[in-house]
Amino acid sequence: MIKSVDGKIAIIGLGYVGLPLAVEFGKKRDVIGFDIKSDRIAELKSGHDATLEITADELKSVPNLSYTSDVADIADCTIFIVTVPSPIDVHKQPDLTPLKKASETVGGILKPGDLVIYESTVYPGATEEECIPVLEKFSGLTFNEGFFVGYSPERVNPGDPHHKLHNIKKVTSGSTPEVATQVDALYNQIITAGTHKAASLKVAEAAKVIENTQRDLNIALINELAIIFNKMGIDTDAVLEAAGTKWNFLPFRPGLVGGHCIGVDPYYLTHKAEAIGYHPEIILAGRRLNDGMGEYVVGQLIKAMLKRKIQIQGSRVLVMGLTFKENCPDLRNTKVVDVIDELKEYGVNVDVHDPWADPDEAQHEYAIELTQTPQPGTYDGIIYAVAHDRFLENDADPRRFGKTDHIVYDLKNFLPRDLSDLRL
């Protein structure tokens, strides 16, 4: 039988998902946050969170939370919640390496009656097909006899001050009806918005992966409309503003689709679909269109520069923003990189400025050296790729970095219409 869900909790992975979870549970009970990155542990122990999801005051105010990178420190825990990344590889296939490694770590210290809950986004069936066999192998215990499993997909929205862990409804599930009830009760201790108990692990997995697939397809539609309207000389934002006056029109906007969820999760679903013999058409069509937006954006900029007789080879373009979304330091799977790479293919010299991004992370992940202080009057083109509020602080002129003759491209439609030359 499962041990009491009142036991000590170990959170495996302390990134954008794991740390807020550890903090919320730490307000109620004993929690140990585990991460293989010793520098991350040192940072948290010093009271700083580089993701900026948790403030220094919040970290200091959690009475029952400690941090470690030593597996021995979590060996006496009875509940293990796995929140490691689930990325895709260069071939756009699921990369379950972090998830399997975490399962090995937990399996090595698993005890009879322990509970393992996964929050990482996966395709339907992955927990049972990929993770549970690893737990069995490394623990020597039998699934649903020696240990039990739950799945509760994360719904974290980085950089969103309004939708936080506690006020986002949580989907829960368990490997038996009894376990599902206990997992649901566990999360109800911290989720004020309530929970939804799914019928099975697979249902919970599928629910998560289609949330972002739906958003991806909706954005792909708007991106395609933007391409059409641009060819017709119609302002897309004006069209969406007019259409949005109808009560049931969905308020999606065009743009680059990156990040840890929307640009990744559909590939998990299509991978599984193809594995069972079905070739998804609509989902992959949306992905192709969204993945091609970087090339489209640069093509539009190059055409506009040529019309102004601006020499392309050796020109200078400033890209404003590198993170995958506004007012957030998250660089995971940012599609701004596609714009930068495409510009370089044309022989353009590219500078990237982002006051939110960590310079060391930008260098490590993308070999991009951020420009800390762009010089006014320097650039032939300026691309506002991310709608950071800081870019317009103190009524700053969006054109201040451009030469006398230059092009401003507003990808996010957040500048006044008369201050940009191109918009999506």
Image: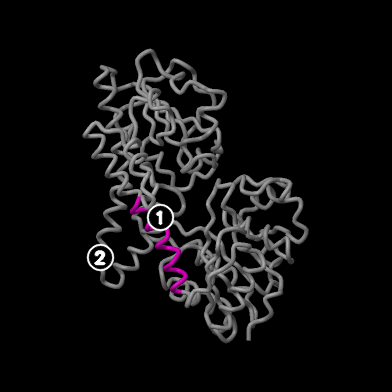
Q: Is residue 209 magenta?
A: yes
- Name the element at disc 2: loop
Type of amino acid at the residue the image marks with label 2:
His
Q: Residue at x 29, y 67 (%)?
A: 274
Q: Which residues are magenta?
A: 202-218
Q: Is residue 343 magenta?
A: no
- Name the element at disc 1: loop
Q: Residues within 10 Å of mark 1 (few under 14, many from 20)?
A: many
Closer to the camera in the image, 419 or 247:
247
Type of amino acid at the residue the image marks with label 1:
Val
- The quarter of the picture where residue 226 lies is top left
Q: Kindly give the residue lying farthest to the top in the view shown.
A: 404
Q: Position of residue 363 (x, y in %)?
A: 50, 38
Q: Kindly give the residue lying farthest to the front in the view shown.
A: 246
Quickly name the residue at label 1.
264
Mark linked to residue 151: none
User: Measured along the vertical axis of the image, is residue 403 above or below residue 385?
Assistant: above
Q: Residues within 10 Å of mark 2 (few under 14, many from 20)?
A: some
Chief secondary structure of the magenta span? helix
Q: Residue at x 34, y 64 (%)?
A: 271
Quickly name the residue at label 2.
279
Q: Position of residue 325 (x, y in %)?
A: 48, 42
Q: Quadrant of the N terminus?
A: bottom right
- The quarter of the picture where residue 275 lies is bottom left
Whole-angstrom CA distance, mark 2 to mark 1, is 18 Å
User: Measured along the vertical axis of the image, is residue 281 above or below residue 47?
Assistant: below
Seen in the image, is 191 located left or right of residue 294?
right
Closer to the camera in the image, 422 or 402:
422
Q: Position of residue 2 (x, y in %)?
A: 63, 82
Seen in the image, is 256 located left or right of residue 9?
left
Seen in the image, is 27 located left or right of residue 144?
right
